[in-house]
Image (cartoon, helix red, strand yellow):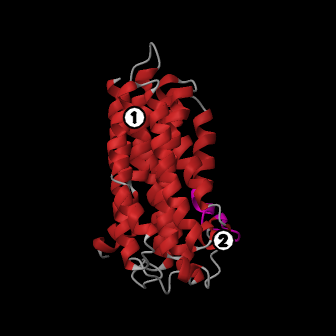
Amino acid sequence: MNLSHWVQGARLRTLPAAVVPVAVGTAAVTQVEGVSIIWWRALAALVVSLALQVATNFVNDYADGDRGTDSDRLGPARLVGGGLVSSRDVKVAAVICFAVAGVAGLLLALAVGPELIAVGAVSMLAGWAYTGGPRPYGYYGLGEVFVFVFFGVVATVGSTYVHTESLSGFSFLASVPVGLLAVALLVINNLRDIPTDGPAGKRTLAVRMGDRSTRRFYVGLMVLVGVFIGLCSLHAPLSFIALVGVLLAAEPARTVLRGAAGRDLIVALGMTGRVQLVAGGLLAVGIFLS
């Protein structure tokens, strides 16, 4: 077994999409009067989020590999599509990650309530059905919806809920820029893959919208992130420091609007990941200190 292959398959660059919502959701607990952060619950929520992200990545790898979608790609080689690891082994790795998420989620459910079991089960099903199963919704342009809902709203609001045991309006608001940042990462990834996804039958939102509209959509998402961070600052004033992270989006936005393609978009993808991590991290810090 080559450990570097598994690290590659876990797609570490995508993990900020799992860390940021937990950080922001946990920080949002400080905006609820009379409630304090319970740190072991925050850690358990982080384990759930990370495990679900990696499990979804592995499902995506073996499902796309089995369908032949990854046989001709511009990005980094995938485990199955690149012939690095067998489809069966990647499936097992996905199941193990789902199990880790399940155990951590069960601990939270025992402390908070059985409703978390239902949320966890739906999240796992969504992670698998993204590219797995006979009719993967990621192939029908719904991947961005999944990312916004589960790595934006559910992960952020859920990370607040495990402490407060009630729904927080501010947490819902804070989940919007978090979800939009995660969507932007997927959009630029799918923009890069338009030339190969279309012929392979993978009708992502980028394929459906077309190259030009997808580029504008990406920039629009970054603008909306700034707008919603501004709205968050009306309730938690120091949230505005997250705008520093949004300013970092200027460079990848210019790259996208100039018509960058192929490997140039891989660089822009990395810059987008940095925007997500910095803006999301500063949003969490700003909320916590407000």
| Closer to the camera in the image, 245 or 29 | 245
- Give me the residue at 33% from left, 39% from top: 282
| Closer to the camera in the image, 135 or 235 | 235
In the displayed image of the protein, which residue is found farthest to the top?
A: 34
Residue 27 covered by magenta stretch? no
Q: Position of residue 222 (x, y in %)?
A: 47, 52
In the displayed image of the protein, which residue is found farthest to the right?
A: 135
Q: Are marks 1 and 2 in contact (CB under 8 Å)?
A: no
Residue range highlighted in magenta: 127-137
Q: Callout 1 environment at 10 Å: few (<14), some (14 to 19), or many (20+)?
A: many
| Closer to the camera in the image, 216 or 157 | 216
Mark 1 lies on residue: 42
Examine the image and state in which quarter residue 285 appears.
top left
Q: Amino acid at mark 2?
A: Arg
Q: Secondary structure at mark 2?
A: helix
Res 98 visible: no
